[in-house]
Amino acid sequence: LVPSDYAATLSELKQHVHAARFQAQRKANTELLMLWWRIGRTILDRQVQEAWGTGVLKRLANDLRSEFPSMKGFSVANLRYMRRFTTAWPEENAIRQRPVGELPWGHIIELLDKLDDQEQRDWYAAKDVAHGWSRPVLAHQITTRLHEREAAAPTNFTSALERPDSELAQQITRDPYALDFLAIDSDAAERELEERLVDRIVDTLHELGPGFAFVGRQVHFDVDGDDFFVDLLFFHIEQLRYVVIELKTTKFEPRDAGQLGFYVTLVDDKLRNRSKHEPTVGILLVAGKNDAVVRYALASTTQPVAVSRYELAEDAQAALPDEATIARAFGEELARGTDVEDDSEG
């Protein structure tokens, strides 16, 4: 007979195995990075002392591959990355103490290739470790300059929310939102446009940032017989608050803030558990905005709302579908439970 506590014991042992494997992988990755760093330091020192050229690097690459045929990473290009790695992070002991020491090698290559500023490299490395980005997501965040966009949306949070909640809510905003991955030729057929939108909509979830859990699309509210529909509704699991997202394919107008504030009030009244949840906030995504007009509009709104612009590829602006199509496609993709991340590239 199987003991009554067998299932619980097996579950506990599985957790131990998973934790040990994870720690072993992290340690192995760090040790590999230290090896690459030491090789890079040796090459750098020899090039300074002996003026090593490209020919010597080619020979070194060939000799290392011959000596260690089962190991990858001894190409000339990779040896050059090792040298750059050493130059970017010149203190050996600091590698183990900084976020960069927890990153896969491919992610470090992205940092070296796409960034020249060392502070920005460390900033993106820390974000990468904290959020578990895949390499393509890291590349996208660097290319779209997340460090400039994060927490940058104009809001009325400081007047509509108490501190420090207003500061926390500000952190989940971005301005602009980079939706360039929805790019499609302006002459594309409507069906093709919708299919492409659904295919890439998971990237939109990445762009919203960590912590967002999908609740629903076109969420219905009945107000004494009148019907209202929220485009997209999320729950931020880290901040324990509902987030209403409304989409406008036109330039911001003051009435848009009032409409979003109305939806925030509905969600706050109908769905929020006031003993457990923080106040609901709203984010309006618009095709364009006059920041001065936005400031005046937000000053006249008592509900906590933010207004952000979204960016598309230049040739795709005219091809963007209407708000209903975006919300429908977004919700259908999320409802299918599509895998949001593939980290096979390291």
Image: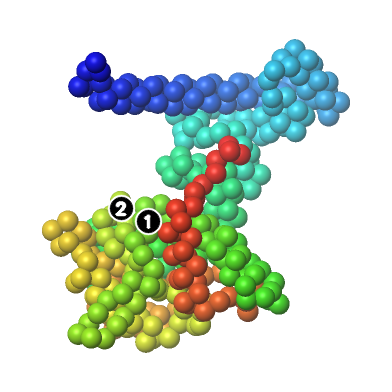
**Placement of 120 over or under 217, stated as above or below:** above
The three-letter amino acid code for the residue at tag 1 is: Phe
Q: Where's residue 209, x and y in %?
A: 43, 55
Q: Are discs 1 and 2 less than 8 Å apart at CB? A: yes
**Outermost residue to the front:** 1
Dot 1 or dot 2: first in sequence order is 1
Left or right relative to 60: residue 28: left
Crowding near the residue tagged with mark 2, few <14, some 14–19, many ≥20 C-alpha atoms within 10 Å: few
Q: For the residues marked 1 and 2, what is the alpha-carbon distance in whole angstroms? A: 6 Å
Q: Where's residue 328, x and y in %?
A: 46, 70
Q: Residue at x 58, y 30 (%)?
A: 90
**Placement of 208 over or under 300, stated as above or below:** above
Q: Where's residue 31, x and y in %?
A: 54, 21
**Residue at label 1?**
212
Disc 2 is placed on an element classified as loop
Q: Name the one closer to the observer, 83 or 128.
A: 128
The three-letter amino acid code for the residue at tag 2 is: Ile
Left or right relative to 31: residue 252: left
Crowding near the residue tagged with mark 1, few <14, some 14–19, many ≥20 C-alpha atoms within 10 Å: many
**Outermost residue to the left:** 275
**Residue at label 2?**
237
The numbered dot on residue 96 is none
**Outermost residue to the right:** 55
**Outermost residue to the top:** 67
Q: Residue at x 33, y 65 (%)?
A: 243
Q: Quadrant of residue 64?
A: top right
Q: Where's residue 42, x and y in %?
A: 68, 20
Disc 1 is placed on an element classified as strand
Task: State whether residue 10 appears in this view.
Answer: yes
